[in-house]
Amino acid sequence: MNIRAIAGYASAEMGITAVETMAQIYLLEFYVSIIGLKPSLFGLAMLIAILWDAISDPIMGFISDRTSFTTGRRRAYIIVGGLLLGIAVYFLFTPPALESQTAKFIYLLSLYFLTNTFMTIIAVPHIALGGELTSRTDERNQVFGWRLFFANLGLLAGLLLPALWVGAGADLFESRSSSALVVGELLIFVSLLSYVSTKGKDKPLEKWKKDPDHIVSGGFSAFLQSTRSIWKNRFFRPLLFAFIVATFARTLNSSIGLLYYKQRLLLEDSKVVTRILLPFVFFLILSIPLWIYLANHFGKKWPAFWGSFLLGVMTVFLYPNLPPGSYEAPLIAAFFGGIFAGSILLFDSLVADIVDYDELLSGEKREGAYFGFWKMATKIVRAIGFACIGFLLEAIGYKEGSAIQDPELGHNLTILFGPVVGCFFIAGSLIFSRLQLTSETYKRIQDLLVRKRSIRKKANAGVSAG
């Protein structure tokens, strides 16, 4: 495939991830410490909004699978979703002056609800399109490698912009609001770039599926049938369960990370970003070629397993023992954490491979449905994780809107950030080890699928000639 087309396609992930990063890293602190919302109400708002977002993902995937735009099935959603999401993220971090807890809760719930809805419109068709760009497993590793590369650029944008505004003299409210404006503009730009770069690459709905009978059959019953077949896929279940557990760990890790560094290690907010989180992302980006190389030479399963497993072991033992006041020790943790975390690209690439197995069985290409369920599961876990974090913070003594916290809070945060998060990573890797989709199995699937497509193509050509 043309690298320019792959990179242009993947660029939208930079804007998507920048929005997600600001929400995961800064939203809790913004609404609890700056706006003054109770942590439990914050967790409840996250739970409701993200659960809706999760439910909408498979629906959006199903819709994009059956869309018959002349430009293709996915691309129109990328440009529309990018525009709406870019606007929503600005207002999410720019609330008006609100006095009561009820008003703050309703505002957060409403704006995060809209943000997640627009995120679904762009993100599900975009990742599904990535699985359709090529059927070669080595090229798919490149596609999802480029996605991860741009995702990390977005991660950098979401992390650094608020810190840069603070460094320039802005207060915390202004830094978050101004950063959200820039992130929104970035998202709109890269969505347009992705739309233009994938012209001709988005496969339209097959002609036989455009008739009225198919549209009728494509309603709720077809959605349920698609759901059942996805759930029965023997390769998809262990991959999905493993990713769910790992996502719960990532949610806890990203949400309480700043609090851990500030309350336990007594480090400054802006320096944590530039000296620890920024190097983490840098090391993660550097690891992408390594994981692509390992996957191409040893298959995707075991490199993905060892990346997740070693990340968990490191988290369990290293973070509880980092000395307060030191930036050097967390930097070492960021190095190893970034390298191990890069293996995440192999999970998305495996989903695209599993879709090929589903096509072999069903005769339909359902990337949207699979990636919709993939995102749904992870968002449900994120919702539960956010809700748990809100109540856990209250349980361990975190005081909303207060600059001075109980000294015991640092120790309690360490237990959550270290052993608890690490054990979830380890558990996810052990579940993943049960996946039976090896490189040899996938090669057999591809051979059978090529033959089946050839037979279908000849049959369709015969019908057209008749």
Image (tube, helix red, strand yellow):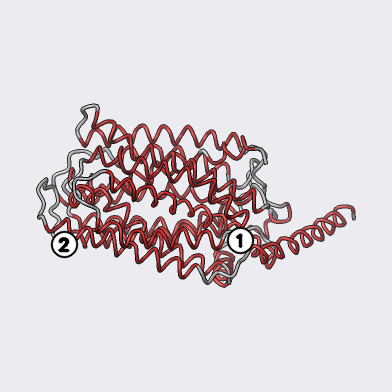
**From what the image shows, is residue 338 above or below residue 82?**
below
User: Residue at label 2?
Assistant: 396
Q: Earlier in the sequence, mark 1 or mark 2?
A: 1
| Residue at 46% over, 68% down | 241
User: Residue at label 1?
Assistant: 218
Between marks 1 and 2 in the image, the one whose residue lies nearer the viewer: 2
Label 1 sits on what residue type? Gly
Between 397 and 441, the residue placed more toward the observer is 441
Q: Image quadrant for the N terminus?
A: top right
Q: Position of residue 57 (x, y in %)?
A: 47, 56
* Contact, mark 1 vs mark 2 (Cβ under 8 Å): no
**From what the image shows, is residue 28 above or below residue 356?**
above
- Mark 1 is surrounded, within 10 Å at the Cα level, by few (under 14), some (14 to 19) or many (20 or more) other residues, namely some
Work out how far the residue at label 1 is from the one at label 2, CA to CA, in angstroms.
49 Å
Label 2 sits on what residue type? Ile
Q: Position of residue 31 (x, y in %)?
A: 22, 47
| Residue at 35% over, 51% down | 113
| Residue at 12% over, 53% down | 399
Q: Secondary structure at mark 2?
A: loop
- Mark 2 is surrounded, within 10 Å at the Cα level, by few (under 14), some (14 to 19) or many (20 or more) other residues, namely some
Q: Is residue 186 left or right of residue 274?
A: right
Tell which residue pokes out farthest to the top in this image.
168
Q: Image quadrant for the C terminus?
A: bottom right
Between 378 and 42, the residue placed more toward the observer is 378
Q: Is residue 58 left or right of residue 281?
A: right
| Residue at 54% over, 43% down | 146
